[in-house]
Amino acid sequence: MSPEHQASLQDLLAQKPFLRFWLARVSGILANQMLSVALAWHMYELTGSAWDLGLVGLFQFVPALILTLPAGHVVDKLNKVHIYASCMLIQAVVACVLVWGTQSDAVTREWVLLVSAILGMVRAFQMPAQQALTPHLVPANLLQRAIALSSTGVQTAVISGPAIGGILYATHVNAVYATCAAFLLLAFIFAITVRYDHKPSQAAANLRSVLAGAYFVWHHKVLLGAVVLDLFAVLLGGVTALLPIYAKDILHTGPEGLGVLRSSPAVGALIMAAVLTQWPIERKVGRFLLMAVAVFGLANLIFGISTHMALSVAALVVAGAADNVSVVTRMTLMQLETPEDMRGRVAAVNSLFIGGSNQLGEFESGATAALWGPVGSVVFGGLATVGVALATLKIFPDLANRDRMIQPK
């Protein structure tokens, strides 16, 4: 590592409020992942119904869909640390209630659905708050490294959270809920100690203000291009929903193989996050973003036609690494280009688009797999993603030609 890069990394690690918030995010996401796994398994044990299992996700998604844009307005108005810390505390209380309910044998199907809806409402505020807070904690020249380092923690939690949750669940479901409560309380403690210079938005509490984030993104072609690019890449190129079919019918492996396949993209994302923390993209960021999306599509295409476990895992690792280049670049551009008093509302738009594309992407994968089979679905998605990257060159030239993260004045 060059002395300049070493100095920049040391400067980032010297940002104490950012590090405390990083620890809060890692603790919170680890608990979120464990709680999601436990709730799904708990519901299936209670009812044995695949329909009810799907309702757990739906009851989390719908409240988030309804509340995310208004939540962005609230995030711009109020102290972001207080909002995030409150989200952690509410989820800790929910986990404690689940411990009590399970211990007293009171948890029912309706309980799990109610808890799922509460978690969906809370996370509608959590996501824009945590996205909008990071730029307040580091100087602009360290923002890309800060987002990459945040991604490192997130991916580590995404990889380890379900595994830890599964191991604890094997002992008792309350072992998961109690551990979740402990991690969420830890996240609350870390978050509440973070301080930043809060400047509340002066926008009025009306529909125009709530939709201001969407209006800003629509008229800012660099941001619009980045969001649309990621939306269609995830919508068309995602393969997560079809991994059970690939594991069982194409790669002829069992549940342990499915676990490896599911964690492979996160492993690639974690590796790339570590790389970007030390060597951030400094020039031709638009071209790197488009190349990353194209590589994501090609890697998924290779996964789609592969019949060998090792090649399939390698393709998913590459796809995860390429996707993380896209995520870090998009998030950095979004934070740098957005006025300080609008970051919550713009982050809400981003959360809405990306959350929606994940859900619709799973539906798209299932629908096309029903028509063309799983291989046809994944191959189509990979080719379509490459096509989206090429089309972006023409449709959003401002994004494609963007040279630096921070434009010279």
Image (cartoon, rainbow, N blue to C red):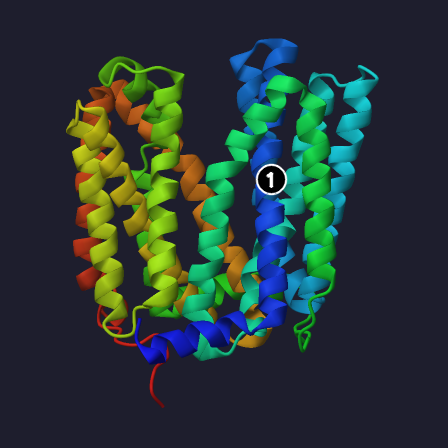
Q: Secondary structure at mark 1?
A: helix
Question: Residue 215 versus residue 323: which sits nearer the camera?
Answer: 323
User: Residue at position x 32%, y 61% from top?
Assistant: 225
Q: Quadrant of the N terminus?
A: bottom left
Q: Quadrant of the C terminus?
A: bottom left
Query: Is 282 drawn above or below residue 317 in the view shown?
Result: below
User: Residue at position x 55%, y 25% from top?
Assistant: 166
Image spot of residue 206 (x, y percent): 67, 64
Answer yes or no: is residue 182 visible: yes
Query: Is 77 drawn above or below residue 234 in the view shown?
Result: below
Q: Please give left or right for residue 190 compared with residue 157 in the image.
A: right
The amino acid type found where label 1 is placed reads: Asn
Query: Is 294 drawn above or below residue 240 in the view shown?
Result: below
Q: Which residue is mark 1?
A: 32
Q: Please give left or right for residue 34 compared with residue 199 in the image.
A: left
Query: Is 27 drawn above or below residue 316 in the view shown?
Result: below
